[in-house]
Amino acid sequence: MAPGTVQLNILGWNKKLRKYVKDGQAQKAMQLFQQIQQEGMSPDTFTFVQVINACAGLGALEEGRHVHEQIIQSGCESDVFVGNSLVDMYAKCGSIEDSWKMFKKMPSRDVVTWNTMILGRVKCGQGQKALELFQQMQQEGVQPNSVTFVGVLNACASVLALEDGRCAHKQIIESGWDSDIFVGSSLVDIYAKCGSMEDAWNVFKNMPSRHVVTWTTMILGHVKCGQGQKALELFRQMQRENVRPNSVTFVGVLNACASIVALEEGRCAHEQIIECGWDSDVFVGSSLVDMYAKCGSMEDAQRVFNKMPSHDVVTWNSMILGHVKCGQGQKALELFQQMNKEGVQPDSVTFVGVLNACASIVALEEGRCVHQQIIESGWDSNVFVGNSLVDMYAKCGSMEDAQTVFNKMPSHDVISWNAILGGCAMHGHGNEALKLFEQILHDFTKIGTLQLVDLLGRAGKLHEAENMIKAMPGKPYVPAWRALLAACKIHGNVEMGERVAKQFLELEPENAVDYVLLSNIYAAAGNRHLCENVELQRHERGVENQTGRTWIEVKNEVHSFIAGNQAHPQMIEIHTEL
DNA sequence: GTAGGGTTAG
């Protein structure tokens, strides 16, 4: 075949290849690539770009590497388009290291190269590194464009870097990219994700045009900030402006309904979803299940679940967690078995739900089976799963297993300590609780003081705790004393409470919480006189009861309420009532 | 007459 013929023909093949890739038929594109080579034609840079795109679409790392080899052999690797597609392919196939290697290897880079690398870093959770790349890009004199800013804003949002986001916003305005709809949506997104709804609104209002994605971002932002009602208002406004919702919009609306337990609104949304044909979407379906479950209608949740054409791990999780929350632990376990039968791989959320189910119905044997499965699937190093295992064993009465799991955990948080100490207290293992408490003191700063109140109260070993705090090396550690004071309150130990309070009211006389705790101890003991004395003392020392907020504790939970800047006049009555 | 990177989600 004459070389001229080859060149003429490859153009046609490339066009066909491009169409497959554009239509998402990556597998067909790969077959076509095979065919091109079988026909004895040499792929050119255009061919390679499309094939690499197909590999990226399939997430086919090995095939991608293989094509890369061919590219090197053909001498096309230094082409900037080919290089860009390789950087992108490696990132999309999950190998950010190869992506970075390719980036560094490229003899020349353009703005697309930088954008691809920045976005790749963001997508694999390296937001900070993406921001560094942006700096570097500017130092090298490459002008950012709208895609760059989308990537940068995503990076800021992913690491909640609000200030960096504001800087980028300024730059965006200066360079005139703020009227771009993609950039605008990303601006709304970063402000909403960082909890600054006011800024999000400002961007939103000033945008020259809004797209369904912009509206959806606003709706989701309000849901995340706990403003479900406002999210629904936005949804109505969006429809008045004739913007058609998409599947993501409905996910946001259903989240909003779930968050404010608005069953009727949820049903309305469901009707609309059916009309628009989104009910077969697995994301929408899972959100429907979740919404009905959170609104307490498990029948509806089950009905939606049965109608869905396919279930993934999140759909199953919504069902399992919904049943656990409604007190139907047995049903949750049945669902888990069904899920296993259908070959859907459980994740940490599944295991937490299933272990909670076991604990709720005291199903130790089932719990052990689940534990085995957790070990086999490698989820046992996850702290959430570990906590649930400790809790399950403790609630099922096997403190030995609870202790073994606890000791094997790579790290502990407040939930872990609560689970193990709660178990010790429940089963009267006072000495074990004390040993654990000693361990906690070594790791004190990581434990929230208020939670410790609970632990100490449950362990019921106030004197030992007092001695241990005294034995702690270094300066007296006020939070530890404060925790003990609160524990005295739980235990009604007025004598120790007074002693402890006196000690550290001198260490930190300006903290209103301590006065409140002490006066709570007196109030709980029914001594209004001493209670008033403490308030008087606080007043004399000029300590304001900050923002007029005071704390009370009911059933081991700390509640706060606003009082005047005096002690609440009905402190004792409130306590008696509670 | 062919190429590359982009917004929201359970």
Image (spheres, coloured by chain):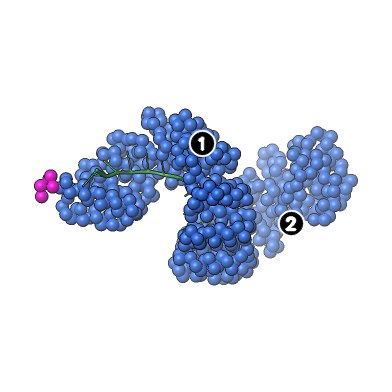
Residue toward you, A558 or A40: A40
Say what amino acid the circle numbered 2 marks: Lys
Residue A555's disc is 2
Can residue A353 be seen in this snapshot? no
| Relative side of A513 to A372, left or right | right
Determine whether the residue tagged by mark 2 lies in a helix, strand or loop. Answer: loop
Q: Position of residue A138 (x, y in %)?
A: 41, 30
Q: Main secondary structure of the magenta part?
A: helix
Q: Chain of mark 1?
A: A
Q: Nearer the viewer, mark 2 or mark 1?
A: 1
**Residue A509, x across and y down, in percent:** 77, 36
Q: Amino acid at mark 1?
A: Gly
Give percent across and percent down for residue A396: 63, 67
- Which chain letter matches label 2? A
Residue at (73, 50) in percent of width and height = A559
Q: Residue at x 73, y 47 (%)?
A: A560
Q: Nearer the viewer, residue A45 or A529?
A: A45
Please, which residue is most extreme toward the right here? A529
User: Element under label 1?
Assistant: helix
Tell me, what hue is chain A? blue
Pick the front one: A296 or A253 = A253
Q: Which mark is residue A165?
A: 1
**Vertical comparison of A121 with A432: above or below:** above
* x and y, in percent, of residue A106 in the image: 30, 37
- In reply to whether residue A3 is colored magenta, the answer given is yes
